[in-house]
Every structure is written in C-alpha cells, then in structure tokens.
Image: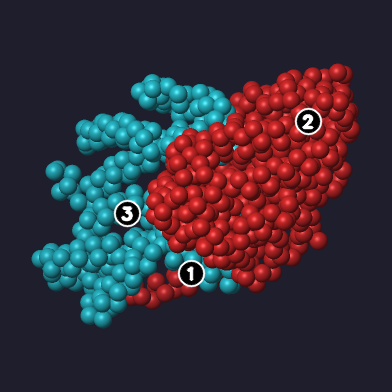
Amino acid sequence: MKLHLRRNLAAAAAAAALALAGCSASAGSGAGSGDSTLTLGLITPVTTFDAADASWANESPYMQAVYDTLLHAAPDGAIEPWLATSWSYNADKTVLTMKLRNDVVFSDGTKFTAEAAAENLLRFRDGTSPQAAYLASLKDAKALNATTLEIDLSQPNPSLLSFLTQNCGLMESPKDFGSKTESTVPDGSGPYVLDQKDTVVGSTYVFTPNPRYWGPKSQQRYSRLVMIDYQSPTAMLNAIKGGQINVGTLIDDNEIDQVKAAGYTIYGEDLNFFGLILFDRAGTMTKALGDVRVRQAINYALDRTALLKAVGDGYGQVTEQIFAPTSTAYDKSLDSTYPYDPAKAKQLLSEAGYAPGSITLTEPESSGFPPAAYSLIQQELIDVGINVNYVQEGNATFLPDALAGKYSSMLMQLKAGPTTWETVSNALLPTSGWNALHYASSTVTQLAHTIQSGSSAEAAAAAKQLNRYIVDQAWFAPLYYPEQSFVSDAHTTLETQVGNAYPYLWNITPK
Amino acid sequence: MLLFIVRRLLSGIAMILAIAVLGYMLLYVGGGNIARNLLGPDATAATVAQKAHELGLDRPLIVQFGDWAGHALRGDFGSSWFTGQPVTTAIMTRLSVTLSLVLGATLVTAVVSTVLGVLAATRRGWVDRLCQFLSVLGSAVPGFLVALGLVLAFAIGTHWFEPTGYVQFSSSPAGWLSSITLPVIALSLGGIAAVTQQIRGAMIDALRQDYVRTLRSRGLPARSVILRHVLRNAAGPALSVLAVHFAGLLGGAVVIEQMFALPGVGEVAVTATQEGDIPLVMGLVLATAILVIMLNLVVDLVQGWLNPKMRLS
C-alpha cells in the first residue's frame, strides 16, 4: 500500500528548517555585537551575596559588581585607596586607623559610615567565609566618628591591607543584615545592582548600573553585565568559539589554539603552585618523611621540566618554592636547589638508611588532577626506590580527608598568595589549615614573628630566610606554577590580577 | 476509574516516602564533610565546624532527617546550602527549562519514531532495513558526541543557532526555539531506536490481524486503515516505552544541560550532589519522583483511552 506521507513530511521538514534557520543568533547576549553588554564566562556561580560569608577568587566578579571594598588593589597587588581614602598603623602595627569617604550610599539609600564598616568587618570575622580566618587577629573594629574607622588587632597582620581589598573588605548595607534574601539579593554600594528578573540563581547573573553609585564612570563602562557559570569546560569553549562571551577562563590549555583561531586573546597568570605537600615532617605517620634527607631525595627525584611539559602542556613555570614571585619571600636562586638528579636522590636515601623499596607513601588521588601527574610522579619516585600507593578519593572526601590529617603527603595545587604572610598563615604555621599534621618548627615560628612585627626591611629579610629554610628542609616538593589562562574577545581587553583566579572587574575594558 | 486513580496516587505517595528516606541516607553516607566541601580548602577547621553547626550537620542523622521531613510535609523544603536560594524557587525556576528540553525531545522522539516505525512496518524491504539502521545509529552514538557535532556544524560553523545558553519563551519565542533546538535533537536521538522498534513490531503484528483485512475489504483508504485503526492498536506498547524513555530523559538531560549551559534542574543537580547540598538534592529527587509518578498515571489513563479492553482489566 502506498502512502503519501513522504511528500507531506518532506514539505513539513523543509518549512521547519527554514523557520528555525531564521531564528538565529540575535537571541544571544550580544558579545561583540556593538552594544555595551559585558558577558563574562565563569566556572562557578556565586555561593552567597551575604558579605559576611562571601568567597573570593572565582567569585570576585560577582561581588565586585555590587559591593565596594575598603581598599582596592592594582593589578600588581599595590594597595590603593577606595572607600578608605587614607590609613596608618600605630607603632606596633596593632591599630589601623582609616579615613573613609563621606559620599557613599548603599543601593537601599542608607549612608555608608564608619559604623557600617566596623559592623561588616566584625561580621566577616565571625562568619563562615572560607577566608574568615584572615581576620582572626581582628580584636575589635569601631567608629571613632562617621568617617574614621579604627581596627584593633590582637597581633600584627602583614596581609591585612591586602585582605581588605578582597572579601574581607566587602561593605554591605547594615539594613540588609539578616534579611531573608541576603544571600541571593545583594545590597551594596558598588557600581551595579542585581537584575533579579533576568537572573537565574546558580547559573546566570545579570547586573545593571547602580543609579546611586558614587564612584567614577570608569567603574560603569557597561550598561549591562552578564555573568554565566559554565559547569562544562566544553560549554565554555563553545561559548568562546561562538562569540557569546567577552571574557572567560580557560580550563584546559590544550584549547588555546582553538581559542586563538576564534579571534580571542590569551592572558596568563601564575596563581598557584602544584606539587607535593610533605605533611609528615615529624615522621609520626611515615617515619621516613621525618628525615630531611628523604624529603630532599623526593625533590631530587622529580623532573619538574618534564612534568610541566607532560602534565601542564608546558604552560607554567617550574619552581621549587611555594611563594609567589610577587611576594617578598620569593628568591629566584632557590629554583636551582634541587636539579633533577635521581642518583643524588638514591644517595640521600642510602645515607638515611633506607634500602630501595623500603619506603612507601600513601597518598590520596583525586579526579581533579590529571591522572598523568599521579602516574608520572609515582614512576619517578619508584625509580629512586620510593613506592607510592594512591587511594582513590571522591570529590566529597578528598579535601576533608587530606585536611583532617589522614595522609602523610599528597599532590595538591595550592594558592601562592600575592603576599608572603598569606602563604605563611595558610600553610606553614602549626595552626595553618594546610599544615595538616600541625608540625611546629621554632625557626619558622621565629621568622614568622619577624615577618609579622618587624620593620619592612626586617620582614622582607625574614621572609627570604623563611623561604630558604622551607626549601632546604624540603617541607614541600613543588613542581611548577601552572599558568591560568584567561581570554578576551576582539572588543575587550583585560589586565590579570596578581594572585586572583579572575581579572578584577574594573580591569576589563572595551577596546 | 476513580478508584484506579486513588490507588495509584496512594502507591505513589508510599513510593515518594521510600525514595525520600533512601535518598537522604545515601546523601548522608556519601556526602563526606559537607561543610568542608561548601567552604573549600582555605577555610580553617574552626570555620568548617561553625558552618557544620549552622547547617545542623552536627546533629544525629535521624534528627536531621526528621527536621527536614517535618518541614517538607509543610511544604518548606529549605534553602540551598550552596546559594541560599529557597529550594522550591530554585526548582520551579529551572523546571521550565528542563521540561522544555525533555518534552521537546519526547515529542521529537514520538514523531520521528512513529514515522520510521510506520514506514518500516508498511513498506518493509529496503525501507524497513534503512529505518532500522538509522534508528540504531541514532542510539549508538553517545548523546554528548551528537551534541558536539550539532554545535560545531550548526552553531559555531554556520551561526544558525546559539552554541550555549537559554532564552525564556516569554522573552522571545524565536530565541527560545533557537536555544532549544540543538539540545532537543541531541537528547532525542538516543530514544528513537527503542520506540521505532516498538512501533514497527506492534504495527507488523497488528497488520496481520483479521480486522485489518476486513477494513481493507470494505474499501477504506489505506491511510485511514493505518493511522486510525492499526496505529491506534499498536500505540499502546510504544507509549509505555515512551513513558519510560521520558523518565530516562530527565537523567539524560543532565549532560545536555551542562554542555549547552542550559539553566535546568539537571545542571544544578550535578553541582548540588557533588557539593552535598542536601536540601536542594532532596528537593530535586522528590520533584523528579513526583513527575515520573504522575507521568505513569497519565500514561495509564491514555492507555485506557486507546484500548478500552485495558479499562476493564
């Protein structure tokens, strides 16, 4: 039996194809289309707009759109005035006095005062931001008058000014404290306000200019900001290739050629160090790690250049230290302390009394790092006589188990903060989170104290000494600083921000 | 009929309760240190403990579940631990995106499968073999590869469609259609084989029945015999397969939503599960369970309409 279905279906299909092909790219966000919309591609949505619990790094653009901070940081990390116009410390650096602007108004009409600033600082200290500990030394914050803020510290904090340029220094309207919508609807004094109608929480955030904004027009270059969270690197890459975003983060450096072919410019920034953390310097879990010769042998056993090429595709810079090049502790000469020398590694192990194969390291393995990194490191250590067993950890347990002190060593990528103190407090002190077994060293404690309390010259000298000590004592086996790549389209230019996972919003400008 | 519906609804409620208990236990056991996951590696142990206390994670499991269940029964599913957004709002905002995708894929699957199945059953020979080949090919290629190919060919290459993103229907129907077309195609290809085979097999069986010979001998047009009588009898089993496929599409939408950056429930489900965002995951689990249970009820009712014999059984 014959049907005439074919003819009818063919006609319908042709009509549909014509209709759909006409419904094309005008529905997009307008990246590069000539309007003043800035579309950013990000790899995480905002956790909360509650300034007391705010995150930073990849969430910094969301916060910078709607909030001001007490201070600003230039792309090279230099501290600049912002809501605070001037500041000074007392002699022992435990009291910071700041003069504040008197012309700032929050988006709800409330005036910004020193009282509001003090409340914000105390709330951050007592909140559950991942960086709440940055203000652990904040004893009190009070308003001396409407425009003078006094910050009292229990001990000097060399990175405080830098922290006040980040989430620690975010200023939210006190009227919004504790409101039901505090975490999803921001109330700040920043250049933009959240467009709740077009925002899909957890996915796409749209901002429009704040009509009450006090600041320079350079902070409101765009009539609309769209920030899109791309969970899939493929989706981000497709958005770039489709010209849908002005600025984005590149997860996989293998994509650089494709991105350049799409007409985008690549910018690199070394944010972190990637390598082994040798937690067990006292040898309580793995006796061998208590011997500095064993830890040094691990450093000699690893071919950093080859690992950067094989794992990082060559994007980055080999290093043997955990401090960022911008910090006062950084010392280029330390990068030649442990040249790749398996023979030297074997010699050190022998001197320490360990026969080949008698040391076994048990480390967590995460799907967050390339499998090649684990297998190559394992092979290079086996070659000198150290065995490595990997324990597969899920996303939910990898960090908690590592930070709970379950392992004597691990492969990790840690932030190399722009300031020395950030790294010291994060990883070297007995109370530091990334000193998971709470190893205490009197040398480190003494040098840390000088960094905290000494003069600039003393602190800088102590920082370099500390770095040398950490490298000589092989607390870590750093491999390289992986290069974090950012992209901008032909209509946009940007400056990367030292130590931050995303360029600062005001450093993204139209060409 | 009313008794049938009531019985199905009651069994549906029991199923939802069981899913809620099981889901909560699984999340609790597999969630690791949720507060640590929420705050990341830089937070101190003290901050993590504070967060855990704030979220009630330091209470016994049975107390946590009882608290959640008590609120859920009153319609309060809490707020996302990750974004702070009320769970109900989060789901309702995103459900329209996922339903656009899934319903669209189901419709495309139904239409294409019907065409291929009918052609295969009625024309047989090389047409039959070609239809089967095409449908199997569609299911053999993974959905994400299809999605990649579609994006490269029709979005990046030709700019006919947007490679990522979603436009609300209320903002622009044309834009909505443009943003949903490629994802729907990518999602639908996998199910076409199963439904096509079902329709083809059922049609072939039905075409052999005596009543078909009777209808033809009475001079009814072939189209009328096929579409009004044979297809209606063959549709029942295919409808059941389509219903199962719809439920499967809710899971399959996760990958497609991530690849096309569509702000649907699938996209947020992945993040929420990885983070251990229990309120949001439980809300999603229940929403999905309710959707599937209601769908099965509707399918049963439609089956009854299609085949009066089923109403009596």
Q: Which color was chain A given?
A: red
Q: Viewed as shown, does residue A406 lie left or right of A333?
A: left
| Mark number, residue A453 | 2
Which element type, helix, strand or loop, lies under badge 2?
A: helix
Ranked by sequence position, the earlier of labels 3 and 1 is 1
Q: Amino acid at mark 3?
A: His
Q: Which residue is mark 1?
A: B149
Residue B41 x %, y %: 56, 40
Of the 4 image quadrants, the one containing the N terminus of chain A is: bottom left
- How would you rate the neighbour count of disc 3 (Cα within 10 Å): few for under 14, some for 14-19, many for 20 or more? many
- Residue B180, visible in the rendered structure: no
Instruction: State the image quarter where residue A164 is shown.
Output: top right
Question: Do the numbered discs 1 and 2 sit on residues whose CB atoms are within 8 Å?
Answer: no
**What is the x, y in percent for residue A25?**
62, 63
How far is the residue under mark 3 from the one under mark 1? 23 Å
Q: Which numbered disc, 2 or 3, marks the residue closer to the eye?
A: 2
Which residue is at a point 66% across and 69% down the rendered structure image? Answer: A260
Alpha carbon of mark 2 to alpha carbon of mark 3: how far? 67 Å
Q: Whole-Å distance between the Cαs marked 1 and 2?
A: 60 Å
Q: Residue at x 48, y 73 (%)?
A: A14
Query: Horizontal and vertical percent for residue A165?
Result: 76, 38
Please tell me whether residue A15 is drawn above or below residue A504 in the rendered image: below
Figure quadrant of the C terminus of chain A:
bottom right
Q: Residue at x 49, y 58 (%)?
A: A346
